[in-house]
Amino acid sequence: MRQMEKKKWWKVLLPVVLAVNVFVVVMILVSARPDDSKVVLEKEERFEAVEIPEEVSFANEKMPIERFYVKEALDRELLSNVYFHSQTIRYIKLAPRYLSIIEPILKEQGIHEDFKYLALAESGFNPRAISPARAAGFWQIMKGTAGDYGLEVNAEVDERYHIEKATYAACKYLKDSYKKFGNWTLVAASYNRGVTGIKRQMNRQEEDDYYDLLITTETARYVYRIVALKLILENPEKYNFYISEGEKYPIIPTTDVEITGSVSSFSDFAKKQGVSYKVLKDFNPWLRENKLTYSGRKKYWVKIPQL
């Protein structure tokens, strides 16, 4: 009988003991939590529309954004680049290094500085850029066009990859194009489609305004993309890109060294200049082989970085 009573007593007491233990554990956990007033909730990420400036221009030529289809086309390219964060941040970081080379040449040649963004749209600041159509370099110049504008292209040397020389060649092309169109916006479009291609559509449609030409999708978006890149790189903070000067890639000083004879091995040549073969080729992507046959009819200089 007593054993029965003891069993009943434990049946009553056991749940109470368990409840007390649970209560104690809960109190310990609650007391271990930080003060609710100190808990900071992360701000919810938001994706917003991009503000279109009231006035937009390319090479001092007004973009007619009062036309709804023009405004929407620019909006498309701004959205594409503003929300392609990794790529656009890289463009901003690379800009000082390469624009410091391109800008003085454009100014010297009388080409509006906005065309530096055409080079960006063409190559993405990639000195070794090459298209499926085999256009090459910063300015994406075709082999035939390169020959027309004095650039050497062969198995050992391809000056389409020489930033300075290719920029001079591009300037000549742009000025020749301007003589035919008298309008820098059409000049930019013709850089993508070709002078003949643009002229054909102008004659067919009896239209001389780029913004009212019905042309291939790539060319139809081309000028808008250039302008979108211009707007972002000129005022990155407006589009929520906060890149400090210290975060941008530095301009690397270089020394020009003349090649005075044939080079049998640029690997050996690089070592004599105190740099690796990789670094030599990175700063001189126009050298296409490990050797150079020197005829004496033309002088070559290579850039040696001061590391």
Image (spheres, grey):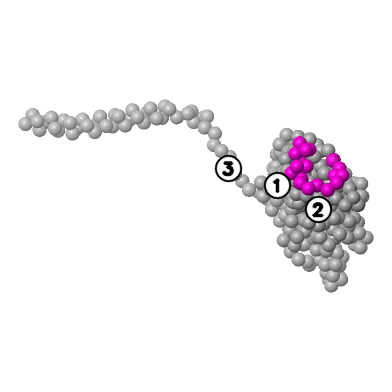
Q: Nearer the viewer, mark 3 or mark 2?
A: 2
Identify the residue shown where x is 71% and y is 38%.
243
| Residue 27 relative to residue 284: left or right | left
Res. 121 visible in picture:
no
Res. 297 visible in picture:
yes
Q: Amino acid at mark 2?
A: Val
The residue to which callout 1 is attached is: 88
- Residue 215 in which image quadrant: bottom right
Q: Earlier along the polypeptide chain: callout 3 or callout 2?
A: 3
Disc 3 versus disc 2: distance between alpha carbons?
A: 53 Å
Assign the N terminus to one quadrant of the image. Answer: top left
Nearest the camera: 126 or 85? 126
Disc 1 versus disc 2: distance between alpha carbons?
A: 31 Å
Identify the residue shown where x is 70% and y is 51%.
81
Crowd around label 1: few <14 · some 14–19 · many ≥20 (10 Å): many
Whether tag 3 and tag 2 are in contact, CB under 8 A, the answer is: no
